[in-house]
Image (tube, rainbow, N blue to C red):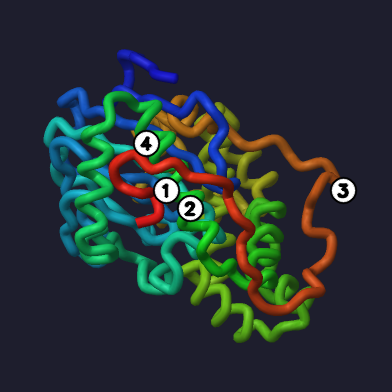
Amino acid sequence: MATGRDDLLWDITCPARPLRVPGVTMAGFRDRGLTPPGLRLVPHPAVALLLVFDGGVTVRDTIGRRRSGSFVTGFGYGDRLDVLRADAFECLQVRLTPMVAYAVLGGAVADLDGTAVTLDDLWGRESARICERLGDLPSWADRFAWVDAWLAHRCARASEAAPEVAWAWRRITDSRGTARVEQVAAELGWSRRQLWARFRAQVGTPPKRAARLVRFDHAVHALVAGRAPAGVAAEGGYADQSHLHRDVAAFSAMTPATVVDEPFLAVDDTAWGRPGPAPKQRAGAGGPAHPPARVGCGRRGAAGAVRSSGLSPGR
């Protein structure tokens, strides 16, 4: 599915078919030559892979380091990620939930908080082969299929995150970020320090910050959907409207009134199917009612046959 909306900075294409791995979304972006320098990305509760196969992109992360080419960002971009330069680029962006990110990246996720790391630094020569392969493929549909197969193959060989960490993440997301860390730890039978250490190692950020970002994400999309800040604050678990204002300023350096015009939020309905807040989950409809009884990590089941086209997705 492609869009040619004139009000967007980029041409955006999305997969027409469901992806193999739950927790993965992707979209293709082509620069129209309109991307302004210094554009700030609004944090999102996911790990992001940016696979640039034409042109160039340079970003600056939270601690001021510049990264060019293809890169992976830590959970939520580490609060700040600025696009310093964009030169007629085409790229495929992949968003990974923390549990999928752990399967794809392994222990490297623990080093990504607050940073953007080039894929050359992370995967060496494999990064160049991946992007070259994407550039050789004739269509977005082929690129989506190839990356989908590559991710499925990689996840099939990987260790899963601890079931307790996965459950804590679901508890945070199902509560829209309002679950208290102390309560989550108590429900697991863990100490707060134990939850912090395991969650930080496998998600890449502490559970309190993860919950705060999930809450912000729902709030900012409610603002984009036209909801009044006072109502968003009351329904989003904020102490008051000033509390919402502080969180929006911390994550975006803007106010609730101005953040709604940000380009990266304007494309959410097109690229990620996210125009506003997700519908509330019906009680009993799959939420994590009880902590996991099993302890430890399992292995992912086979993801099915993966057809190779030049470069094996499993490389």
Instruction: Answer with mark 2 or mark 3, whichever residue precedes in sequence.
Output: 2
Looking at the image, do the residues carrying marks 1 and 4 touch, with CB atoms under 8 Å apart? no
Write the residue at 84% across / 60% down: 289
Look at label 4 and name its amino acid: Phe
How far is mark 4 from mark 2, CA to CA?
30 Å
Residue at image position (62%, 41%) is: 232
Q: Amino acid at mark 2?
A: His
Callout 3 amino acid:
Gly
Asked whether the beta carbons under mark 2 and mark 1 sit within 8 Å of each other, the answer is: yes
Residue tagged 1: 150
One can see residue 252 in this view: no
Rounded to the nearest angstrom, the CA distance separating label 2 from label 1 is 5 Å
Residue lying at 58% horizontally and 47% vertically, measured from the top left: 304
Residue 147 lies in quadrant: top left
Q: Badges 4 and 3: C-beta atoms under 8 Å apart?
A: no
Q: Which mark is residue 190?
A: none
Q: Nearer the viewer, mark 4 or mark 3?
A: 3
From the image, which quarter does the C terminus lie in?
bottom left
Dot 2 crowding, Cα within 10 Å, few <14, some 14–19, many 20+: many
In the image, what residue occupies the spot 59% across and 67% down? Answer: 160
Image mark count: 4
Q: Which residue is mark 4?
A: 264
Residue 153 tag number: 2
Q: Secondary structure at mark 1?
A: helix
Q: Looking at the picture, which amino acid does disc 1 mark?
A: Trp
Q: Position of residue 314 (x, y in %)?
A: 40, 54
Q: Secondary structure at mark 4?
A: helix
Label 3: which residue?
A: 284
Gap in angstroms between the C-alphas marked 3 and 1: 34 Å
